[in-house]
Amino acid sequence: MKIMIAYDGSRNAKLALAQTVGMFRCNAPLLMLVGVAENPRDATDANEDLFQEEVDQLKKALQEGADFATREGFDVDWSLAEGDARKMLLHATQKHRPDLLVIARHSNKPDGGIIAQSLSYFVDELDYMTFGSVSSFLARRVECPLLIFPSP
């Protein structure tokens, strides 16, 4: 069994990895962590430096995730793609044919009170309507089972 996990080192991605380890331990699957660095929108030196910093941080996060899963007794592989996260994750599933794709919903939830939470909800809905989200894009297009962990 192969389980692909979209992984960026965020709190939600770490929780999704830990939950996947707990849920599928008895199946002893190969875990495949996939991170995606999004290309800068313009080619200035400053953006290139920021992009390289993002790539370096993502590589470190992927290695830390792989180390965690290895300590838990799993065989692990990881890869890093560059581009649009939605398309790169879809391409990774087409290339590697996992039995399951695991993703965590992204959350920018503020710590504030009811007004901040209401504003966050509005922004999340607007973002979904105008740009879509990785999880909704993959839910419509991926050709393997998809497990989406909600943000806490």
Image (cartoon, rainbow, N blue to C red):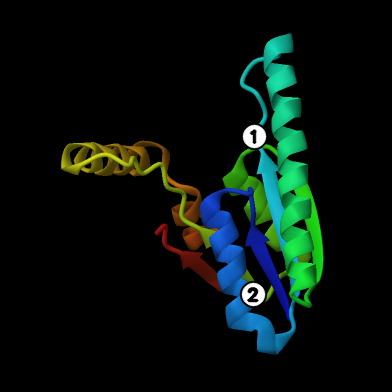
Report whether 51 appears left or right of 120: right
Work out how far the residue at label 2 is from the one at label 1, CA to CA, in angstroms. Answer: 27 Å
Reading the image, the residue beneath label 2 is 21
Q: Residue at x 45, y 47 (%)?
A: 133
Numbered mark located on residue 65 in the image:
none
Q: Hey, which quadrant is residue 77 in on the image? A: bottom right
Q: In what element is the residue under mark 1?
A: loop
Q: Residue at x 70, y 14 (%)?
A: 43
Residue 60 horizontal/vertical position (percent) = 76, 44
Q: Callout 2: few (<14), some (14-19), or many (20+) C-alpha neighbours within 10 Å? A: many
Reading the image, the residue beneath label 1 is 38
In this orientation, does residue 44 appear?
A: no
Q: In what element is the residue under mark 2?
A: helix
Q: Nearer the viewer, residue 50 or 125?
A: 50
Q: Residue at x 60, y 68 (%)?
A: 18
Q: Nearer the viewer, residue 5 or 72?
A: 72
Residue lying farthest to the left in this orientation: 115
Residue 149 horizontal/vertical position (percent) = 47, 65
Report whether 114 appears left or right of 53: left
Residue 17 horizontal/vertical position (percent) = 61, 65
Q: Are marks 2 and 1 in contact (CB under 8 Å)?
A: no
User: In the picture shown, does residue 34 fall above or below 68?
Assistant: above
